[in-house]
Amino acid sequence: MSVFDGLRFRRGSSPIHQLDPRAKFFYVIVMFVVAVLFNELLPLVVLFLIQIPFVFVARVQREWIRSLRGAAFLAIIIFGFNFLFTYLSGQYELSYVLERSFAMSLRFIVLVESFSVFFLTTSPDHLGLALEQSHVPYEFCFAFTTAVRFVPVLAEEAQTIMDAQKTRGLELERGNFIKRIRNYIPILIPLIVNAIRRSLELAEAMESRAWGATEKRTNLYVLKLKKSDYVLALLSILLLVLAVYIRLFLPVPQLGVVLRI
Amino acid sequence: MIEVKGVSFTYPNGVEALREVSLTIHDGEFVAIMGQNGAGKTTLVKQFNGLLKPTRGEIFVDGVNTRKVSVATLARKVGFVFQNPDHQLFCETVEDEVAFALRNFGFEESTIKKRVAWALNLLDLTEYRETSPFMLSGGERKRVALASVLAWNPKVVVLDEPTIGQDHKQKEKLRQFIVQLIAQRKTVIIVTHDVEFVAECNSHVVLMAQGKIVAKGSAKQMLTNSALVTQASIVSPQITQIFLELADLGMPIDLINIHEAREALLNFLEVDS
């Protein structure tokens, strides 16, 4: 559950927390696009590093590290597969293959990093509000914020289910890779069934409290873009333009080559 | 025999759920653990099959330290029925559900068949053998969960809130069922808020409050002692309350269930006439 822990919002009052979710989301999208633009290690390392100040300003280092630790497992698999197949094709030399495989894992890490910063510093309420003000139908906004809010509840329930099945002699760590995945069936089925039951109950409870009675909803709080939000958006656009320019017109050297010079 | 020796337990989030708890539960004993929400009842019983390991202190189940063995090993001896059956049901049929643990424990297929048939019969579930557990009512699902644990015939049976959501008839059945288990020399431990049920069962009672054991004794001693009852934030059975109010008339004040009340009333009427 460490990955989820690294994405769970914690109340805070840093400048990053106070940014408008829309501006932050735009930044995440830009990060995403730029990370996908490059296969090379050098720009991905730069992307990784430029996000670190955000983490420290927001004071979410511990949770951020935890999300990275959670992502490490998948990153290692990505590295393994890329290394294996690029190397086996026999067309490239080892240093290039290593760098390329490492870049692919780092790309994944960069994506997790930006999402982690976003979710760690944006309350589900603000996120819902941002969606609403972006003219997403209220039903969808509500479904989204509810889903986010239920993640910790589900995590706790998963723990109880695991305990119940362990009591019946289930050993999660036993067997080969396939068997280990199959071991999770007795946990996933009750979890999903309960989630569906819970959502039906929630729907009934909400309808009995007149959900959707008014056509036009108003909000007590209204999000307004501030100066800092525009600055972040502007920086993101600059980064995007720069990245596209480099991609189109400049060669990106191998990191190994750069370091040797 | 379960020996709890000076056990303290703190959850990872810093909540101290057990403080220096010591307790011995003998073979064949029937114990009800009672106390208000958050008193540490469930935390305590989860130590018995190793789901939680003590932060300080030790627990021995038949002389085996719970720290030294896996949950699966301890589970062979200590069966644990969770409060909510929906946290464990996942198979396509009731039969598979009951066989699940037996397969995990590596029983032979022929033994599994016999055990499943026995457990289903025991809990009146034979007719639902081929039914999906998800199609059953709440009470029936609870019985399937119970059958799936009893199937491997554990020596100790722990029931977490077994009476919640059960109608009166099912409660009575459950009580008779526990009596049967005791007759087979099994240790039965229940965690419950249901004083009336405990009074009717006349089990031993362990009262807990704020992570500590307040007192242990017979249901009669525990449930008629108003100081202890208040300390553990529970309420005496209704019968006890009535007879306390009638104490002025010379009625006995240490009654907890209907049978005793009936005797006392008959005696009283006889003396009167």
Image: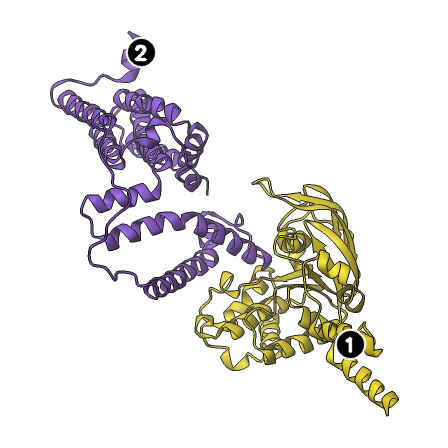
Chain colours: A purple, B yellow
Decide if residue A90 is on the left or right side of residue A190. Answer: left
The furthest residue to the top = A261
Q: Mark 2 points at which residue?
A: A259
The answer to which quarter of the image holds residue A108 is top left
- Crowding near the residue tagged with mark 1, few <14, some 14–19, many ≥20 C-alpha atoms within 10 Å: few
Q: Badge 1 sits on which subunit?
A: B
- Crowding near the residue tagged with mark 2, few <14, some 14–19, many ≥20 C-alpha atoms within 10 Å: few
Q: Position of residue B199 (x, y in %)?
A: 72, 72
- Is residue B101 something one can see in this rendering? yes
Q: Where is residue A182 in the image (x, y as percent from the top left)?
A: 45, 54
The furthest residue to the right = B271
Question: What's the residue type where badge 2 is placed?
Answer: Leu
Tell me, for residue B246, which label it has, or none. Answer: 1
Decide if residue B135 is on the left or right side of residue A163. Answer: left
| Viewer-nearest residue: B220 or A150 | B220
Distance CA(mark 2)–CA(mark 1): 93 Å
Numbered marks: total = 2
| Viewer-nearest residue: A216 or A163 | A216
- Residue at the image point whose x is 27% and y is 36% from the top: A21
In the rendered image, the vertical position of residue B254 relative to residue A215, given as above or below:
below
| Viewer-nearest residue: B171 or A171 | B171
- Is residue A109 something one can see in this rendering? no
- Residue at the image point whose x is 73% and y is 80% from the top: B258
Q: Position of residue B87 (x, y in %)?
A: 50, 61
Question: What's the residue type where badge 1 is placed?
Answer: Leu
The answer to which quarter of the image holds residue A100 is top left
Q: Badge 2 sits on which subunit?
A: A
The answer to which quarter of the image holds residue A49 is top left
> Can you tell which of label 2 and label 1 is closer to the viewer?
1
Q: Where is residue B234 in the image (x, y as percent from the top left)?
A: 67, 62
Label 1 sits on a secondary structure element that is loop
The furthest residue to the bottom = B273
